[in-house]
Image (cartoon, rainbow, N blue to C red):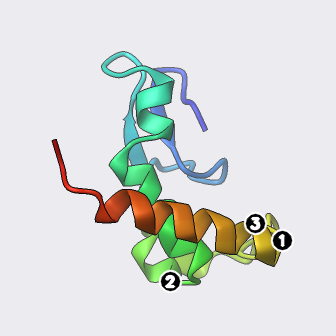
Amino acid sequence: MVQVDGRVTTCCLDEHLENVIGNLTEQPLAALWGGETMQRWRLAQVEGRFEDSGPLCTRCNWQSAGAYPEPKVAEWLQAARARSAKPAR
């Protein structure tokens, strides 16, 4: 969710901006969307570790609203883990 001042959060219900991942006035959306913070958030969501996703996720009743098909989840997890296993340049 993009706020009028450029802050980006992971959730449209984050009206108090508790889970800000960055600001579009400082970074392009592609950098925020594909960045380490969002990758950690996605992994926690996929693994059901909502407490590691941010302050809103543990009390959210939408946790299954965007359920991703299991084969796609497995494919994404495999790719995410392969990326994190590569040595940094």
Dots 1, 3 in contact, CB < 8 A: yes
Q: Residue flagged by tag 3: what amino acid is it? A: Lys
Crowdedness near tag 3: few (<14), some (14–19) or many (≥20) residues, C-alpha within 10 Å: few
Q: CA separation, marks 2 and 3?
A: 18 Å
Asked if 38 appears above or below 72 in the picture, the reply is above
Residue, x 53% and y 61% (percent of image)? Answer: 79
Secondary structure, mark 2, is loop
**Nearer to us in this view, 10 or 16:** 10
Which residue in the rendered view is the most extreme toward the left? 89
**On screen, residue 59 above or below 84:** below
Q: Secondary structure at mark 3?
A: helix
Q: Which quarter of the image is occupied by the N terminus?
A: top right
Q: Which mark is residue 72?
A: 3
Name the residue nearer the viewer: 77 or 43: 77
Residue indicated by mark 2 = 49
Q: Nearer the viewer, residue 35 or 65?
A: 35
Q: Amino acid at mark 2?
A: Arg
Circle 1: residue type: Pro
Q: Please tell me the numbered disc located at residue 69.
A: 1
Circle 2: is it few (<14), some (14-19), or many (20+) Cα within 10 Å? some
Q: Quadrant of residue 45?
A: bottom right
Marks 2,3: beta carbons within 8 A: no
Q: Residue at x 39, y 42 (%)?
A: 35
